[in-house]
Image: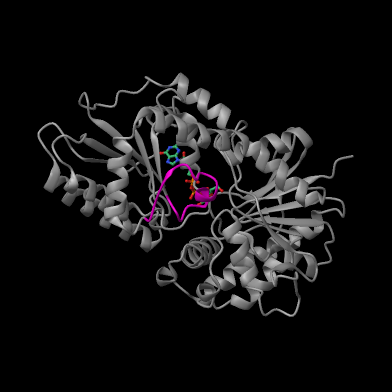
Protein backbone atom coordinates (compact mmCIF):
# COMPACT_ATOMS: atom_id res chain seq x y z
CA UNK A 1 0.00 0.00 0.00
CA UNK A 2 1.22 3.52 -0.83
CA UNK A 3 1.90 5.70 2.19
CA UNK A 4 -0.63 8.49 2.76
CA UNK A 5 0.68 11.83 1.49
CA UNK A 6 -0.05 14.92 3.59
CA UNK A 7 0.75 18.23 1.89
CA UNK A 8 0.89 21.46 3.90
CA UNK A 9 0.96 24.89 2.23
CA UNK A 10 -0.15 28.33 3.37
CA UNK A 11 -2.78 28.54 0.64
CA UNK A 12 -4.94 25.66 -0.41
CA UNK A 13 -7.06 25.57 -3.56
CA UNK A 14 -10.74 25.93 -2.81
CA UNK A 15 -12.16 25.20 -6.26
CA UNK A 16 -12.85 21.61 -7.40
CA UNK A 17 -10.47 21.79 -10.39
CA UNK A 18 -7.69 24.22 -9.51
CA UNK A 19 -5.50 26.07 -12.03
CA UNK A 20 -1.84 27.13 -11.86
CA UNK A 21 1.18 24.81 -12.25
CA UNK A 22 2.17 23.84 -8.72
CA UNK A 23 -1.37 23.66 -7.42
CA UNK A 24 -2.42 21.47 -10.34
CA UNK A 25 0.61 19.23 -9.91
CA UNK A 26 -0.09 18.64 -6.23
CA UNK A 27 -3.80 18.22 -6.97
CA UNK A 28 -3.01 15.59 -9.63
CA UNK A 29 -0.60 13.78 -7.40
CA UNK A 30 -3.02 13.72 -4.46
CA UNK A 31 -5.86 12.68 -6.76
CA UNK A 32 -3.81 9.77 -8.08
CA UNK A 33 -2.62 8.42 -4.76
CA UNK A 34 -5.05 9.88 -2.24
CA UNK A 35 -4.05 11.86 0.80
CA UNK A 36 -4.68 15.16 2.50
CA UNK A 37 -3.98 18.81 1.67
CA UNK A 38 -3.85 21.20 4.61
CA UNK A 39 -3.68 25.01 4.53
CA UNK A 40 -5.02 28.19 6.11
CA UNK A 41 -8.74 28.82 5.89
CA UNK A 42 -8.57 32.14 4.01
CA UNK A 43 -9.74 35.32 5.73
CA UNK A 44 -8.49 35.66 9.33
CA UNK A 45 -11.01 35.04 12.11
CA UNK A 46 -11.57 36.54 15.59
CA UNK A 47 -11.13 33.29 17.50
CA UNK A 48 -9.21 30.47 15.71
CA UNK A 49 -10.48 26.96 16.37
CA UNK A 50 -7.79 24.60 17.70
CA UNK A 51 -8.71 21.91 15.17
CA UNK A 52 -8.28 21.08 11.51
CA UNK A 53 -11.54 21.33 9.58
CA UNK A 54 -12.34 19.23 6.57
CA UNK A 55 -13.62 21.36 3.67
CA UNK A 56 -13.82 18.83 0.88
CA UNK A 57 -13.57 15.12 0.38
CA UNK A 58 -13.03 13.69 -3.08
CA UNK A 59 -10.10 11.68 -4.36
CA UNK A 60 -8.26 13.33 -1.48
CA UNK A 61 -9.21 15.36 1.59
CA UNK A 62 -8.76 19.11 1.99
CA UNK A 63 -8.45 20.48 5.51
CA UNK A 64 -7.99 23.99 6.81
CA UNK A 65 -7.00 25.72 10.03
CA UNK A 66 -7.80 29.25 11.17
CA UNK A 67 -5.51 32.12 11.90
CA UNK A 68 -6.53 35.15 13.95
CA UNK A 69 -6.40 38.77 12.77
CA UNK A 70 -3.31 39.40 14.92
CA UNK A 71 -1.66 36.28 13.53
CA UNK A 72 -2.41 37.41 9.98
CA UNK A 73 -0.52 40.62 10.79
CA UNK A 74 2.30 38.94 12.69
CA UNK A 75 2.75 35.54 11.08
CA UNK A 76 1.77 36.25 7.47
CA UNK A 77 2.32 39.96 6.70
CA UNK A 78 4.96 40.23 9.43
CA UNK A 79 7.40 37.37 9.89
CA UNK A 80 6.77 35.53 6.59
CA UNK A 81 6.53 38.51 4.25
CA UNK A 82 8.34 41.35 6.02
CA UNK A 83 11.19 39.33 7.56
CA UNK A 84 11.83 36.02 5.81
CA UNK A 85 10.81 37.07 2.27
CA UNK A 86 13.10 40.15 2.08
CA UNK A 87 15.94 38.35 3.91
CA UNK A 88 15.82 35.30 1.63
CA UNK A 89 15.70 37.61 -1.42
CA UNK A 90 18.89 39.44 -0.37
CA UNK A 91 17.03 42.52 0.84
CA UNK A 92 17.86 42.47 4.54
CA UNK A 93 17.55 46.28 4.33
CA UNK A 94 13.78 45.85 3.81
CA UNK A 95 13.33 43.58 6.83
CA UNK A 96 10.98 44.76 9.52
CA UNK A 97 12.17 42.92 12.60
CA UNK A 98 9.65 42.89 15.45
CA UNK A 99 9.64 40.41 18.35
CA UNK A 100 5.85 39.98 18.12
CA UNK A 101 6.14 38.87 14.46
CA UNK A 102 8.35 35.97 15.51
CA UNK A 103 5.97 35.19 18.38
CA UNK A 104 2.99 34.96 16.05
CA UNK A 105 4.97 32.89 13.55
CA UNK A 106 5.86 30.41 16.26
CA UNK A 107 2.30 30.44 17.65
CA UNK A 108 0.79 29.52 14.27
CA UNK A 109 3.42 26.84 13.62
CA UNK A 110 3.02 25.44 17.15
CA UNK A 111 -0.78 25.21 16.85
CA UNK A 112 -0.44 23.54 13.47
CA UNK A 113 2.17 21.13 14.88
CA UNK A 114 -0.23 20.18 17.70
CA UNK A 115 -3.00 19.49 15.19
CA UNK A 116 -0.72 17.56 12.84
CA UNK A 117 0.77 15.50 15.67
CA UNK A 118 -2.73 14.25 16.49
CA UNK A 119 -3.45 13.56 12.87
CA UNK A 120 -0.27 12.04 11.35
CA UNK A 121 0.33 8.27 11.32
CA UNK A 122 3.83 6.71 11.44
CA UNK A 123 3.77 5.62 7.78
CA UNK A 124 2.45 8.93 6.41
CA UNK A 125 4.62 11.17 4.25
CA UNK A 126 4.45 14.82 5.23
CA UNK A 127 5.39 17.37 2.59
CA UNK A 128 5.65 20.94 3.90
CA UNK A 129 5.81 23.87 1.47
CA UNK A 130 7.65 27.12 1.84
CA UNK A 131 8.92 29.68 4.29
CA UNK A 132 5.66 30.05 6.21
CA UNK A 133 6.29 26.73 7.96
CA UNK A 134 10.05 26.33 8.42
CA UNK A 135 9.85 25.21 12.10
CA UNK A 136 7.21 22.50 11.57
CA UNK A 137 9.43 19.41 11.48
CA UNK A 138 11.35 20.47 14.59
CA UNK A 139 8.05 21.07 16.42
CA UNK A 140 6.61 17.76 15.21
CA UNK A 141 9.68 15.79 16.30
CA UNK A 142 9.36 17.39 19.76
CA UNK A 143 5.81 15.98 19.80
CA UNK A 144 7.01 12.47 19.00
CA UNK A 145 5.99 12.37 15.32
CA UNK A 146 8.16 9.77 13.58
CA UNK A 147 6.93 9.74 9.97
CA UNK A 148 9.11 11.07 7.12
CA UNK A 149 8.88 14.84 6.83
CA UNK A 150 10.06 16.76 3.79
CA UNK A 151 10.22 20.47 3.07
CA UNK A 152 10.40 22.37 -0.19
CA UNK A 153 11.60 25.97 -0.23
CA UNK A 154 10.19 27.81 -3.27
CA UNK A 155 12.36 30.91 -2.72
CA UNK A 156 16.18 31.22 -2.61
CA UNK A 157 18.14 30.18 0.48
CA UNK A 158 20.18 33.15 1.80
CA UNK A 159 23.94 33.46 2.22
CA UNK A 160 25.34 32.99 5.72
CA UNK A 161 26.21 36.67 6.20
CA UNK A 162 22.62 37.69 5.44
CA UNK A 163 21.18 35.11 7.84
CA UNK A 164 22.99 36.88 10.65
CA UNK A 165 20.42 39.67 10.22
CA UNK A 166 17.75 37.25 11.44
CA UNK A 167 17.31 37.25 15.22
CA UNK A 168 16.39 33.54 14.89
CA UNK A 169 19.53 32.63 12.88
CA UNK A 170 20.40 29.73 15.21
CA UNK A 171 16.87 28.42 15.36
CA UNK A 172 16.81 28.40 11.54
CA UNK A 173 19.65 25.85 11.59
CA UNK A 174 17.63 23.53 13.83
CA UNK A 175 14.45 24.02 11.80
CA UNK A 176 16.22 23.01 8.57
CA UNK A 177 18.08 20.07 10.13
CA UNK A 178 14.89 18.50 11.47
CA UNK A 179 13.64 17.55 7.97
CA UNK A 180 14.39 14.23 6.32
CA UNK A 181 14.57 15.99 2.96
CA UNK A 182 15.22 19.73 2.77
CA UNK A 183 14.41 20.50 -0.87
CA UNK A 184 15.52 23.69 -2.60
CA UNK A 185 15.34 24.90 -6.20
CA UNK A 186 19.00 24.99 -7.29
CA UNK A 187 22.48 23.66 -6.71
CA UNK A 188 23.40 27.18 -5.61
CA UNK A 189 20.79 26.94 -2.86
CA UNK A 190 22.19 23.58 -1.72
CA UNK A 191 25.62 25.20 -1.39
CA UNK A 192 24.18 28.09 0.62
CA UNK A 193 22.30 25.75 2.99
CA UNK A 194 25.44 23.71 3.55
CA UNK A 195 27.57 26.81 4.13
CA UNK A 196 25.31 27.59 7.04
CA UNK A 197 26.45 24.40 8.82
CA UNK A 198 30.16 24.70 8.05
CA UNK A 199 31.14 25.01 11.69
CA UNK A 200 28.41 22.74 13.00
CA UNK A 201 29.58 19.74 15.08
CA UNK A 202 26.73 17.66 13.59
CA UNK A 203 27.77 18.20 9.98
CA UNK A 204 29.34 15.27 8.10
CA UNK A 205 31.93 16.13 5.44
CA UNK A 206 33.36 14.14 2.52
CA UNK A 207 37.08 13.82 1.75
CA UNK A 208 37.02 17.05 -0.31
CA UNK A 209 35.68 18.94 2.69
CA UNK A 210 32.15 19.33 1.29
CA UNK A 211 29.36 18.83 3.75
CA UNK A 212 27.33 15.81 2.68
CA UNK A 213 24.80 15.60 5.44
CA UNK A 214 23.86 16.52 8.92
CA UNK A 215 24.23 13.97 11.64
CA UNK A 216 20.63 12.82 11.52
CA UNK A 217 20.61 12.48 7.74
CA UNK A 218 19.00 15.76 6.69
CA UNK A 219 20.71 16.46 3.39
CA UNK A 220 19.65 19.48 1.36
CA UNK A 221 18.90 18.52 -2.24
CA UNK A 222 17.84 20.50 -5.25
CA UNK A 223 14.66 19.85 -7.19
CA UNK A 224 14.16 22.59 -9.82
CA UNK A 225 10.43 23.10 -10.16
CA UNK A 226 8.93 22.92 -13.64
CA UNK A 227 5.64 23.67 -15.38
CA UNK A 228 3.06 21.57 -17.17
CA UNK A 229 4.88 22.40 -20.39
CA UNK A 230 2.82 20.31 -22.80
CA UNK A 231 -0.42 21.75 -21.51
CA UNK A 232 0.88 25.32 -21.62
CA UNK A 233 2.31 24.91 -25.14
CA UNK A 234 -1.06 23.60 -26.36
CA UNK A 235 -2.89 26.49 -24.68
CA UNK A 236 -0.54 29.08 -26.21
CA UNK A 237 -0.91 27.54 -29.66
CA UNK A 238 -4.70 27.48 -29.38
CA UNK A 239 -4.79 31.08 -28.11
CA UNK A 240 -2.21 32.40 -30.60
CA UNK A 241 -4.42 35.06 -32.19
CA UNK A 242 -7.10 35.29 -29.54
CA UNK A 243 -6.21 38.69 -28.08
CA UNK A 244 -5.88 42.04 -29.91
CA UNK A 245 -2.58 43.64 -28.91
CA UNK A 246 -2.96 47.13 -30.45
CA UNK A 247 0.59 47.16 -31.79
CA UNK A 248 1.62 49.25 -34.78
CA UNK A 249 2.64 47.05 -37.70
CA UNK A 250 6.34 46.26 -37.73
CA UNK A 251 6.91 47.12 -34.08
CA UNK A 252 8.30 44.42 -31.84
CA UNK A 253 6.86 43.19 -28.56
CA UNK A 254 9.04 42.75 -25.48
CA UNK A 255 7.20 41.16 -22.56
CA UNK A 256 7.53 41.13 -18.78
CA UNK A 257 5.15 39.19 -16.49
CA UNK A 258 5.70 39.36 -12.73
CA UNK A 259 3.85 39.79 -9.50
CA UNK A 260 4.56 43.35 -8.41
CA UNK A 261 7.41 42.46 -6.06
CA UNK A 262 10.76 44.15 -5.41
CA UNK A 263 12.58 40.84 -5.92
CA UNK A 264 11.53 40.81 -9.58
CA UNK A 265 13.75 43.79 -10.47
CA UNK A 266 11.11 45.75 -12.37
CA UNK A 267 12.65 49.20 -11.92
CA UNK A 268 16.04 47.83 -13.01
CA UNK A 269 14.31 46.22 -15.99
CA UNK A 270 12.75 49.51 -17.04
CA UNK A 271 16.16 51.18 -16.72
CA UNK A 272 17.67 48.43 -18.88
CA UNK A 273 14.95 48.92 -21.47
CA UNK A 274 15.61 52.67 -21.36
CA UNK A 275 19.28 51.93 -22.13
CA UNK A 276 18.13 50.09 -25.28
CA UNK A 277 15.92 53.09 -26.21
CA UNK A 278 18.79 55.51 -25.72
CA UNK A 279 21.25 53.46 -27.77
CA UNK A 280 18.73 52.83 -30.56
CA UNK A 281 19.60 54.03 -34.04
CA UNK A 282 16.82 54.77 -36.57
CA UNK A 283 17.42 51.45 -38.38
CA UNK A 284 17.01 49.29 -35.25
CA UNK A 285 13.54 47.95 -34.49
CA UNK A 286 11.08 49.91 -32.41
CA UNK A 287 9.98 47.75 -29.53
CA UNK A 288 7.35 48.16 -26.85
CA UNK A 289 7.88 46.67 -23.41
CA UNK A 290 4.52 45.33 -22.22
CA UNK A 291 4.82 44.77 -18.49
CA UNK A 292 2.03 42.81 -16.82
CA UNK A 293 2.36 43.20 -13.05
CA UNK A 294 -0.57 42.09 -10.90
CA UNK A 295 -0.33 43.65 -7.43
CA UNK A 296 0.50 41.45 -4.46
CA UNK A 297 0.84 41.90 -0.67
CA UNK A 298 -0.38 45.49 -0.86
CA UNK A 299 -0.67 45.62 2.94
CA UNK A 300 3.12 45.52 3.23
CA UNK A 301 4.80 48.97 2.93
CA UNK A 302 7.71 47.84 0.76
CA UNK A 303 5.18 46.79 -1.89
CA UNK A 304 3.54 50.24 -1.96
CA UNK A 305 6.97 51.83 -2.41
CA UNK A 306 7.90 49.63 -5.36
CA UNK A 307 4.62 50.47 -7.08
CA UNK A 308 5.21 54.23 -6.79
CA UNK A 309 8.81 53.94 -7.95
CA UNK A 310 7.86 51.81 -10.93
CA UNK A 311 5.09 54.13 -12.07
CA UNK A 312 7.40 57.15 -11.85
CA UNK A 313 10.14 55.36 -13.78
CA UNK A 314 7.75 54.28 -16.56
CA UNK A 315 6.36 57.84 -16.79
CA UNK A 316 9.84 59.35 -17.09
CA UNK A 317 10.98 56.88 -19.75
CA UNK A 318 7.82 57.32 -21.79
CA UNK A 319 8.05 61.10 -21.45
CA UNK A 320 11.56 61.03 -22.88
CA UNK A 321 11.05 58.46 -25.65
CA UNK A 322 7.39 58.19 -26.71
CA UNK A 323 6.38 59.17 -30.24
CA UNK A 324 2.95 59.85 -31.71
CA UNK A 325 2.55 56.22 -32.76
CA UNK A 326 4.68 54.58 -30.08
CA UNK A 327 4.57 54.27 -26.30
CA UNK A 328 7.75 52.40 -25.37
CA UNK A 329 6.51 51.06 -22.01
CA UNK A 330 2.98 49.78 -21.48
CA UNK A 331 2.28 48.78 -17.94
CA UNK A 332 -0.74 46.77 -16.80
CA UNK A 333 -1.16 46.64 -13.03
CA UNK A 334 -3.78 43.93 -12.77
CA UNK A 335 -4.18 40.22 -13.17
CA UNK A 336 -4.88 39.02 -16.71
CA UNK A 337 -6.62 35.75 -17.62
CA UNK A 338 -4.37 32.75 -18.10
CA UNK A 339 -5.60 32.31 -21.71
CA UNK A 340 -4.73 35.93 -22.45
CA UNK A 341 -1.32 35.49 -20.89
CA UNK A 342 -0.64 32.43 -23.05
CA UNK A 343 -1.62 34.37 -26.16
CA UNK A 344 0.64 37.31 -25.31
CA UNK A 345 3.58 35.02 -24.50
CA UNK A 346 3.15 33.34 -27.86
CA UNK A 347 3.32 36.60 -29.74
CA UNK A 348 6.12 38.25 -27.80
CA UNK A 349 9.41 38.64 -29.68
CA UNK A 350 11.39 38.87 -26.46
CA UNK A 351 10.72 38.12 -22.79
CA UNK A 352 12.62 39.98 -20.08
CA UNK A 353 12.90 37.80 -16.98
CA UNK A 354 15.33 39.85 -14.92
CA UNK A 355 14.76 39.29 -11.19
CA UNK A 356 17.33 40.43 -8.64
CA UNK A 357 16.63 37.19 -6.74
CA UNK A 358 14.17 34.42 -7.53
CA UNK A 359 13.78 30.83 -6.37
CA UNK A 360 13.08 29.56 -9.87
CA UNK A 361 10.82 31.84 -12.00
CA UNK A 362 8.15 29.98 -13.88
CA UNK A 363 7.48 32.85 -16.29
CA UNK A 364 10.76 32.02 -18.05
CA UNK A 365 9.60 28.43 -18.57
CA UNK A 366 6.09 29.42 -19.64
CA UNK A 367 7.53 31.81 -22.25
CA UNK A 368 9.72 29.05 -23.71
CA UNK A 369 6.83 26.56 -23.80
CA UNK A 370 4.52 29.10 -25.48
CA UNK A 371 6.77 29.89 -28.46
CA UNK A 372 6.24 28.76 -32.03
CA UNK A 373 9.33 26.53 -32.56
CA UNK A 374 9.50 27.68 -36.21
CA UNK A 375 9.66 31.36 -35.28
CA UNK A 376 10.50 31.55 -31.58
CA UNK A 377 11.03 34.61 -29.43
CA UNK A 378 14.18 35.20 -27.38
CA UNK A 379 14.46 34.85 -23.61
CA UNK A 380 16.55 37.39 -21.67
CA UNK A 381 17.25 35.87 -18.27
CA UNK A 382 18.89 37.16 -15.10
CA UNK A 383 21.78 35.22 -13.54
CA UNK A 384 19.83 35.58 -10.29
CA UNK A 385 16.78 33.52 -11.32
CA UNK A 386 16.94 29.90 -10.19
CA UNK A 387 15.98 29.03 -13.78
CA UNK A 388 19.42 30.27 -14.89
CA UNK A 389 20.97 26.91 -13.87
CA UNK A 390 18.79 25.07 -16.38
CA UNK A 391 18.00 27.62 -19.12
CA UNK A 392 21.58 28.30 -20.12
CA UNK A 393 20.66 29.02 -23.77
CA UNK A 394 18.85 32.21 -22.82
CA UNK A 395 20.62 35.56 -23.22
CA UNK A 396 22.00 35.82 -19.68
CA UNK A 397 22.23 39.26 -18.09
CA UNK A 398 23.22 41.02 -14.91
CA UNK A 399 20.03 42.94 -14.07
CA UNK A 400 21.99 45.60 -12.17
CA UNK A 401 23.88 46.57 -15.35
CA UNK A 402 21.41 48.64 -17.39
CA UNK A 403 23.77 48.98 -20.35
CA UNK A 404 24.22 45.21 -20.56
CA UNK A 405 20.46 44.64 -20.34
CA UNK A 406 19.91 47.28 -23.06
CA UNK A 407 22.41 45.52 -25.32
CA UNK A 408 20.70 42.19 -24.70
CA UNK A 409 17.36 43.71 -25.82
CA UNK A 410 19.03 44.94 -29.00
CA UNK A 411 20.69 41.53 -29.60
CA UNK A 412 17.41 39.71 -28.99
CA UNK A 413 15.46 41.96 -31.36
CA UNK A 414 17.93 41.45 -34.18
CA UNK A 415 18.85 37.79 -33.60
CA UNK A 416 18.82 35.74 -36.85
CA UNK A 417 16.10 33.09 -37.15
CA UNK A 418 18.60 30.18 -37.18
CA UNK A 419 20.09 31.22 -33.84
CA UNK A 420 16.66 31.86 -32.32
CA UNK A 421 15.54 28.38 -33.36
CA UNK A 422 18.69 26.68 -32.11
CA UNK A 423 18.55 28.36 -28.71
CA UNK A 424 14.83 27.79 -28.35
CA UNK A 425 15.07 24.08 -29.24
CA UNK A 426 17.56 23.52 -26.42
CA UNK A 427 15.51 25.55 -23.95
CA UNK A 428 12.32 23.73 -24.90
CA UNK A 429 13.99 20.35 -24.46
CA UNK A 430 14.76 21.25 -20.85
CA UNK A 431 11.35 22.76 -20.10
CA UNK A 432 9.55 19.73 -21.56
CA UNK A 433 11.76 17.13 -19.85
CA UNK A 434 12.10 18.66 -16.41
CA UNK A 435 8.43 19.50 -16.14
CA UNK A 436 6.16 19.61 -13.12
CA UNK A 437 5.40 15.87 -13.20
CA UNK A 438 9.16 15.15 -13.21
CA UNK A 439 9.60 17.50 -10.25
CA UNK A 440 6.84 15.86 -8.20
CA UNK A 441 8.19 12.37 -9.00
CA UNK A 442 11.75 13.35 -8.09
CA UNK A 443 10.74 14.97 -4.82
CA UNK A 444 8.44 12.20 -3.68
CA UNK A 445 11.06 9.59 -4.62
CA UNK A 446 13.51 11.35 -2.32
CA UNK A 447 10.93 11.70 0.45
CA UNK A 448 10.07 8.01 0.26
CA UNK A 449 13.78 7.28 0.38
CA UNK A 450 13.73 5.55 -2.99
CA UNK A 451 15.10 8.33 -5.20
C1 LIG B 1 7.39 31.49 -6.11
C2 LIG B 1 8.89 31.83 -6.26
C3 LIG B 1 9.09 30.01 -7.96
C4 LIG B 1 1.79 36.27 -13.18
N1 LIG B 1 1.00 37.29 -13.55
C5 LIG B 1 -0.16 36.75 -13.93
C6 LIG B 1 -0.08 35.36 -13.78
N2 LIG B 1 1.13 35.09 -13.32
C7 LIG B 1 1.63 33.73 -13.05
C8 LIG B 1 2.75 33.35 -13.99
C9 LIG B 1 3.45 32.26 -13.20
C10 LIG B 1 3.22 32.70 -11.76
O1 LIG B 1 2.17 33.65 -11.76
C11 LIG B 1 4.45 33.39 -11.17
O2 LIG B 1 5.39 32.41 -10.90
P1 LIG B 1 6.90 32.76 -10.55
O3 LIG B 1 7.66 31.49 -10.53
O4 LIG B 1 7.42 33.72 -11.57
O5 LIG B 1 6.90 33.59 -9.20
P2 LIG B 1 6.29 33.57 -7.66
O6 LIG B 1 4.84 33.86 -7.65
O7 LIG B 1 7.13 34.57 -6.96
O8 LIG B 1 6.52 32.11 -7.08
C12 LIG B 1 9.37 31.49 -7.66
C13 LIG B 1 7.63 29.66 -7.67
O9 LIG B 1 7.27 30.05 -6.33
C14 LIG B 1 7.38 28.15 -7.81
O10 LIG B 1 8.23 27.41 -6.98
O11 LIG B 1 9.36 29.79 -9.34
O12 LIG B 1 10.76 31.74 -7.77
O13 LIG B 1 9.11 33.21 -5.97
O14 LIG B 1 2.83 31.03 -13.37
O15 LIG B 1 2.20 32.93 -15.21
N3 LIG B 1 -1.07 34.51 -14.10
C15 LIG B 1 -2.23 35.07 -14.59
N4 LIG B 1 -2.38 36.41 -14.73
C16 LIG B 1 -1.38 37.29 -14.42
O16 LIG B 1 -1.57 38.50 -14.56
N5 LIG B 1 -3.24 34.26 -14.93
**Does the magenta segment cover residue 73?**
no
Q: Residue furthest right?
A: 1
Vertically, is 176 above or below 224? below
Q: Position of residue 400 (x, y in %)?
A: 34, 59
Image coordinates of residue 387 in percent, x first then y, are: 51, 48
Instruction: Work out whether residue 266 can be spotted.
Output: yes
* Quadrant of the image containing the N terminus: top right
Residue pictured at 26% horizontal, 54% vertical: 403
Where residue 52 sits in the image (x, y, percent)?
71, 52
Q: From the viewer's perspective, tell me whether residue 176 is left or right of residue 330.
A: right
Q: Nearer the viewer, residue 197 or 207?
A: 207
**Does residue 351 lie above or below 38 as drawn?**
above
Residue 389 on the magenta segment: yes
Residue found 51% across the figure and 27% down from its top: 233
| Colouring | one colour
**Residue at coordinates 77% horizontally, 51% vertically from top-left?**
447
- Residue closest to the eye, 47 or 433: 433
- Horizontally, residue 353 falls left or right of residue 410, namely right
Give the number of callouts: 0
Which residues make up the magenta segment? 382-398
Q: Is residue 67 visible?
A: no
Q: Residue at x 50, y 77 (%)?
A: 165
Of 341 and 213, the residue lying toward us: 213
Relative image position of residue 281 (x, y in whole percent): 15, 40
Nearest the eye: 158 or 38:
158
Amino acid sequence: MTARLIVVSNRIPTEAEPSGGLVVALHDCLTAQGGVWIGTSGAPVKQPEPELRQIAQGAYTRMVFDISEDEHEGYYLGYANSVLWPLFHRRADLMHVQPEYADHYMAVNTRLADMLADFAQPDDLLWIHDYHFLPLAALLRERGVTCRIGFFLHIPFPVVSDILALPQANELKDWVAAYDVFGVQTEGDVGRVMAHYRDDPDAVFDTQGRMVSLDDGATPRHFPIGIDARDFAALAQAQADAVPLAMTLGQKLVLGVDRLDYSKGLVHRFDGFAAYLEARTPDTPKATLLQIAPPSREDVDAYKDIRTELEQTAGMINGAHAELDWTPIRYIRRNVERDTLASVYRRADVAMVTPLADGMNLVAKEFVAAQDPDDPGVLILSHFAGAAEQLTDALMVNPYDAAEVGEAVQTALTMPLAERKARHARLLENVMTEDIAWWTRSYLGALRGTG
